Image: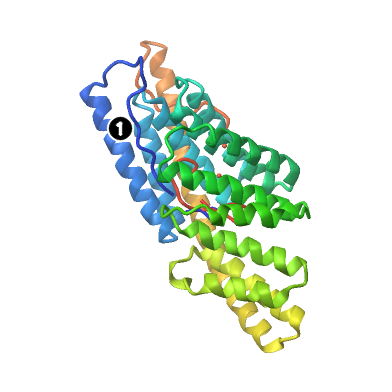
Amino acid sequence: MFNKFFFFFFLMVNLVSGQNILSNDDAYNKKKSEELASSAVSHFKNNDLKKSTELLFKAKEYAEKTDDYALIARMNGSIAHQYVQLNLNDKAKFYLSNAIQQVNKLPEGDKKKLLKTLSFLEIGNIDFDEGNYQKANDYYKKSLREIELVKKRDEQSLYHHRRSLYNIGNSYYFLTNDSAEIYLNKALAIKNNYNKELDHFIYNSLSQVYSERKEYQRAIDTLKVVLKHKNELDKRLLSDVYYNLSQNYKYLGDQSQYSFYNEEYIKLNKWTKEKEMQAISSAINAEQKDYKEAISDADSSKKKRCCDSGHFCFVSSRSDHLFALPQEKRKEGF
């Protein structure tokens, strides 16, 4: 399923109506959280999952020192998205649950609908990873319904509209439903300059649809369109492209091309697995730090309650990471 593909970006966050004006400390914490998350996105795009993960946990720490529900939701959602990329779905559910709790505190409006769209996408991604393709498809459709209710049709909302259509189409492919191609082409038909990487994930999924119909050359031609952007591609997506090319050449009986792309796939897949293991190690270290701080806060609160905490008390939903990162796995183009 992507991301990965994932592609990560940031929502513009305004003060929630009804909240008090932020103090200088809150303003600093919010700015610091955004800066760290932005840096995490840059490292993610450079395939440095380890550093990206470290920065996201730091961004969450600063976000949770504010009373900005949307910001807290985005940072927890981004960590959830990162865990989905690493196939650690139980961890992803933990952080997604917390993100959703924060989203539910927001007043009705476009911001809430957009974050609900992202939440449904992420829940669908988890179900997709676990092989529950029908459930995933149902959540992707919920995300589509939410995004279609957003009144302000800017570049970001159009991007997530495309993501919803892409994920519906991709899940239909795994359900062997003929609607897969329809939804994938609907996603391509929406013209949007924001995060063009999503197109590469859509073409990759379309190639699988063609291959399933035994249109192997058409599948290869579609993958070659993606390969033109080889140097820009997320490494996990590039690994998928190499694998799909190898299989289509195998079906055509072209042993030379099959061997070439299969070898490229094996080399790149090994590299991506090593990067994922480094990111998992980084996440474990960050969680241990978070856990120790939570214990310290709890101990202090026995004497005096503190309103400024880095608590770690929720269960979790694939950015923006959910909420901030632009990467999609095979199931998703963001």
Residue drawn at x 51%, y 51% as measured from the top left: 334
Return the residue nearer the eye: 46 or 307.
Answer: 46
Q: Is residue 194 visible?
A: yes
Residue 41 relative to residue 262: left or right = left
Residue 259 relative to residue 14: left or right = right
Q: Can residue 132 be seen in this view?
A: no
The quadrant where residue 58 appears? top left
Q: Name the residue under label 1.
A: 30
Query: Looking at the image, is 301 positioned above or below residue 290?
Result: above
Q: Is mark 1 on a helix, strand or loop?
A: helix
| Image location (x, y in percent) of residue 128 | 68, 47
* Tally of numbered discs: 1
Residue drawn at x 41%, y 52% as measured from the top left: 194
Q: Which amino acid does label 1 sit on?
A: Lys
Return the residue nearer the eye: 177 or 116.
Answer: 177
Query: Looking at the image, is 30 positioned above or below residue 244?
Result: above
Return the residue nearer the eye: 218 or 65.
Answer: 218
Residue drawn at x 42%, y 58% as measured from the top left: 45
Residue drawn at x 59%, y 71% as measured from the top left: 223
Residue 222 relative to residue 281: left or right = right
The quadrant where residue 21 appears? top left
Query: Looking at the image, is 147 positioned above or below residue 192?
Result: above
